[in-house]
Amino acid sequence: MLRIGCLLLLSALPALSQSPDFDILITGGRIVDGGGNPWFVGDVGIVGDTVVYVGPPTGKQGKKTLSAKGLIVAPGFIDTHSHGRRGVFEVPTAENQIRQGVTTIIEGPDGSSPYPIKPFLDRFSKVPATTNFGLMLGQGTVREQVIGLKDRKATPEEIIRMEGMVRQAMRDGAFGLSTGLFYIPGAFTPTEEVAALAKVAGELGGVYTSHMRSEAAAIVDAVKETIRIGELAGIPVQVTHHKVIGRANWGLSKETVRLVAEARARGLDVTIDQYPYTASSTGLAALFPKWTRIRPRPAGADARRNRYRH
């Protein structure tokens, strides 16, 4: 009887509490992992600021448990084409990004970026920003510092100097080289000159993104040039915000997409991104002939433009 009584007493005691396995546990959501895999219902476990588990339901515990039943759980989105380098200091909370699920922004597109890179990134590291932040090096920025806003080819010595600037920027943390060949001074740059700088970025693990010379009547030739730069430089290529402007040119995307597909088939890493709206945006000066735009821009012009574009 004593033995039975002890067993009954022990069975009446509450189970020993276990320490939670995760700080945050997200349960029951449709997980889209970003790797191209089909979605599945599962759990996401977070410890500190690190996701440590993504998989089927585990039955484990979290200090805080969030039910995502009926919702999609996905990694944060990456805005690969941001003009937010001024805004990130003025409004580091970046609610316009965070509330859309964007957790990483890449600045320095269209051939325009801060230079040198390191002081900018050092300054950003002290800002309590809510997003991750990366920089492309702008080819137009590099060219303007070396040649100015002049419509001519670079000399061999100038190319060597610009290659050194690209090399330093990559070592300072740039993700690659961007061009705005529609804009000044990028529009003055021959294909081979761009390829020379892109090759340096590629050798250091970078990518090449381009606002091409044309997104209207000459768009097919512009895509061909972009692909050729990738081939000459041996670098991954991104055709950024791909679009076809002007009713007379609608349908040319069949040809541009075919060119990209053929380049990929022969082994070149070429991709396209597209923004999800029908409007386009740029500075009014871009609509004027190139020769009218070679005067130096007034102080602060780039900052004002970058504040409002896209």
Image (cartoon, helix red, strand yellow):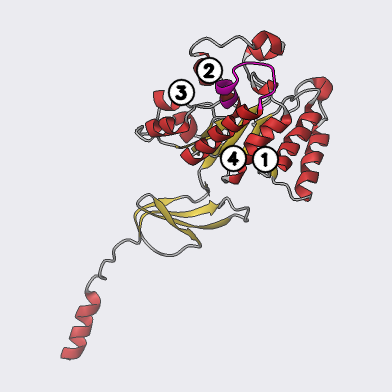
Disc 2 packing (10 Å; few <14; some 14–19; many ≥20): few
Residue placed most toward the observer, 31 or 37: 37
Q: Which residues are magenta?
A: 142-155
Q: Is residue 55 left or right of residue 259?
A: left
Asked whether residue 160 appears in the rendered view, the answer is yes
Name the disc covering residue 86, or none.
3
Q: CA distance from mark 2 to mark 3?
A: 10 Å
Q: Are marks 3 and 4 in contact (CB under 8 Å)?
A: no
Q: Nearer the viewer, mark 4 or mark 1?
A: 4
Which element type, helix, strand or loop, lies under badge 1?
A: strand
Instruction: Residue type at mark 4: give it.
Output: Ala
Q: Which residue is mark 2?
A: 302
Instruction: Residue type at mark 2: give it.
Output: Asp
Percent across and percent down for residue 50 are 40, 52
Q: CA distance from mark 4 to mark 1?
A: 12 Å
Location of residue 48 with respect to 110 vertically, above or below: below
Name the disc covering residue 237, or none.
1
Q: CA distance from mark 1 to mark 3?
A: 26 Å
Name the disc covering residue 201, or none.
4
Majority secondary structure of the magenta segment?
loop
Which quadrant is the N terminus positioned in? bottom left
Q: Are marks 2 and 3 in contact (CB under 8 Å)?
A: no
Which residue sits at x=49%, y=26%?
114
Which element type, helix, strand or loop, lies under badge 4?
A: helix
Disc 4 packing (10 Å; few <14; some 14–19; many ≥20): many
Membership of 58 in magenta stretch: no
Which element type, helix, strand or loop, lies under badge 3?
A: loop
- Along the polypeptide, which appears first: circle 2 or circle 3? 3
